[in-house]
Image (cartoon, rainbow, N blue to C red):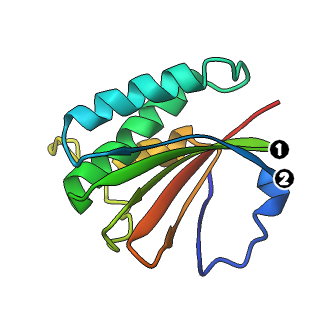
Amino acid sequence: MSAFNESGSSDLAIYFGDFLSTIAAFTMPAMADSVQLARQQVTELLSNESSIDMEHAIAVTSELVANSVVHAATELQVVLERWQYMVKVVVEDFDNQLPVMRSLDVAVDSGRGMHIIDEYADLWGYELTEKGKRIWAGFNVA
């Protein structure tokens, strides 16, 4: 798995291909219930993408939304983008705190989210926006 941010020099077009469409975008409050709602929406919206490992896509969606709810505590937007070679799950919020890959500690019940994203997504990254940040995870499609 690879992570990219706005300071990276890689041309992500080789991984994504051409942008095709926004599958969906929905705004959610910074509430625990938003995690389950996002899981349901993404499951429904990606049900026709047979080449994506849905368990991984749902786990990553859960982590992206949960991280935003817990750490940003602002309204968030979930966006699904269809690219030539990937589907991207994007979570945008109004906090400029960047994701942190914490050391794994079996004695602590939290801190595994970015490790799950790194393990399950084919590619992930983030960028700061004028209002906060976007964290995305990409899943290869056939």
Towards the viewer: 19 or 135: 19
Towards the viewer: 23 or 138: 23
Q: Which label sits on residue 84?
A: 1
Tell whether label 2 touches label 1 (CB within 8 Å): yes
Mark 2 residue type: Gly
Q: Quadrant of residue 54?
A: top right
Q: In this figure, what is the number of numbered marks? A: 2
Could you tell me how far apart the alpha carbons at marks 1 and 2 are, in whole angstroms? 5 Å
Above-or-below relation of 93 to 16: below
Towards the viewer: 8 or 107: 8
Mark 1 residue type: Gln
Residue 86 visible (yes or no): yes
Where is residue 43? Give x, y as percent: 50, 22
Q: Which residue shows up at 28% across the image and 55% down it?
A: 75
Q: Is residue 74 left or right of residue 127?
A: left
User: Which residue has dot 2 on it?
Assistant: 17
Q: Which residue shows up at 20% across the image and 52% down it?
A: 70
Where is residue 79? Give x, y as percent: 52, 46
Q: Is residue 114 left or right of residue 141?
A: left
Q: Quadrant of residue 21?
A: top right
Q: Which residue shows up at 20% across the image and 57% down it?
A: 73
Q: Residues within 10 Å of mark 2 (few under 14, many from 20)?
A: few
Residue 114 visible (yes or no): no
Where is residue 46? Give x, y as percent: 60, 25
